[in-house]
Image (cartoon, grey):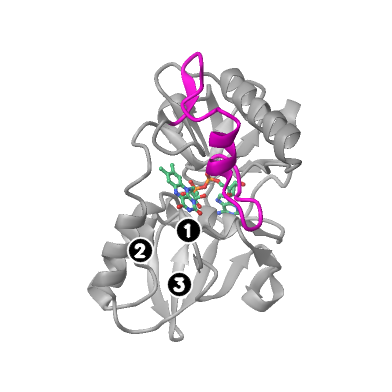
Amino acid sequence: MHKQIDFSKHSSIKIGPTVDVFVIEDKHYPKEYTMLGHCNNVLLGEELPPLMILGKNFDYIKIEDGLLCIGGATAGGRVLSFCKKQDIAHFELLPKLPGSIGGMIKMNAGLKEYEIFNYLHSIITEDGEILKKDIPHGYRWTEFKGVVFEARFEIHKGFNQAHLEMFKKMRDNQPLDPSAGSCFKNPKDDSAGRLIQEVGLKGFQIGGMAFSEKHANFLVNLGGGTFNEAIELIQLAQKKVFEQFNIHLENEVIIIDTRYF
Ligand SMILES: Cc1cc2nc3c(=O)[nH]c(=O)nc-3n(C[C@H](O)[C@H](O)[C@H](O)COP(=O)(O)OP(=O)(O)OC[C@H]3O[C@@H](n4cnc5c(N)ncnc54)[C@H](O)[C@@H]3O)c2cc1C
C-alpha cells in the first residue's frame, strides 16, 4: 500500500514536499527504500529517495514472556500511558521525546544519561531477534541493519512520578517553534548550543529558519522556512565552529535528500 504524505505538515520541523510513501504492512519491504518514523528528527529535502513507513500493524504494546514488547510504529506517548497504568518504571522520559519506538531505537534517543537503550532487551528486524548486547550503540547512534518491527524491554515495577516531573522540567528551555529537536550532537565534554552561541549564531536567522533565541542548538522554523535555508544555517554553524574551535559539529538531525547522502 502507498500513502500520500505532506511533510510540510507531518514533519516536526514543517518542511518537505508531498510524496507517495510505501506503507509496510507485513514484514516485507523494498530494501532500497529509506525508512521514516514519525519525522521528529529528520529534515526532508526536495530530491527525496523512495520512502517507507510502518503501518498500523506495528502500533501495539503487549507483555509477553516477561518482556514489554512494543511495535516499531507505536508513539512514545502511548507507551508512557501504558507504563503509568501498569506501574512500569524507566519510560518516564518519554513525554518530551516525540517519536515512534522504532525511531527512538535507531537514534538511541534520550536525555543525558537516560537513554532508550538502558532497559532494552532486544529488537525484532527481518533477521529475527537481535539482543541488545549484539547492537553497537552509544550517544545518539546505533549500528544495525533494517527496520525495527518491534522493541522488547525489561520490565521493572514502579512508575516514578518524580522522574516524570524531572524530565518535564529538563525540557523547560526548549523552544516551542517547529524543530527537529537538537540540530547537532554535543561534542565530547562540550555543548553544541554553547558553541553556536560563542560564534554569534544564537538567534541568527536566514529566511524563515533560525537558531533559536531560546536554545541555540534548536534549528527552528519561524514560518515558511525552507530546506535550503536550513542547510545554509547548518553549514554556516559547522564552518564557524570549526574555524574558531577546531571542532566538527556532527548533525543529530538526519538529512534526507539524495544530494546529501
Ligand atoms: C521538540 C523536540 C524535542 C526533542 N528532544 C529530544 C531529546 O531530548 N533527546 C533525543 O534523543 N531526541 C530528541 N528529539 C528527537 C526525536 O524525538 C528522536 O530522535 C526520536 O527518536 C525520533 O523518532 P521518530 O519516530 O520521529 O523518527 P524519525 O525522525 O522519523 O527518524 C529518525 C531516524 O530513525 C530511523 N527510523 C525510524 N523508524 C525506524 C524503524 N522502525 N526502524 C529503523 N529505523 C527507523 C529513520 O530512518 C531515521 O534515521 C526531539 C525532537 C523534537 C521535535
In this rendering, position of residue 81 left or right of residue 67:
left
* Contact (Cβ within 8 Å) of mark 1 with mark 2: yes
Q: Mark 2 and mark 3 in contact? Answer it, CB < 8 Å.
A: no
At 51% from the left edge and 23% from the top edge, which residue is drawn? 204
- Residue that mark 2 sits on: 79
- Give the label, 2 or 3, closer to the camera: 2
Which mark identifies residue 137? Answer: none
- Judged left or right of residue 120, residue 135 is right
Q: Give the spatial CA distance, label 3 vs label 1.
A: 11 Å
Q: Residues within 10 Å of mark 1 (few under 14, many from 20)?
A: many
Decide which of tag 1 and tag 2 comes sooner along the chain.
2
**Magenta stretch: dominant secondary structure:** loop
Which amino acid type is shown beneath numbered disc 1? Ile
Which of the 4 quarters of the picture holds residue 258?
Answer: top right
Circle 3 sits on which residue? 69
Looking at the image, tell me whether mark 3 or mark 1 is earlier in sequence order.
Answer: 3
What separation in Å lies between label 2 and label 3 (alpha carbons)? 10 Å
Q: Which residue is mark 1?
A: 101
The residues tagged by marks 1 and 2 sit, at their Cα atoms, a distance apart of 9 Å
Label 2, secondary structure: give it: helix
| Left or right of 129 in this view: 181 | left
Residue 203 within the magenta-colored segment of the rendering: yes
Query: Magenta part of the protein: which range?
Result: 183-212
> What amino acid is found at the position of numbered circle 2 in the picture?
Val
Residue 45 seen in render: no
Residue 81 picture location, percent across and down: 27, 64
Name the kind of residue labelled 3 in the image. Cys
Q: Between 61 and 23, which is closer to the camera in this rendering?
A: 61
Establish if 58 lies above or below 90: above
Badge 3 marks a residue whose secondary structure is strand
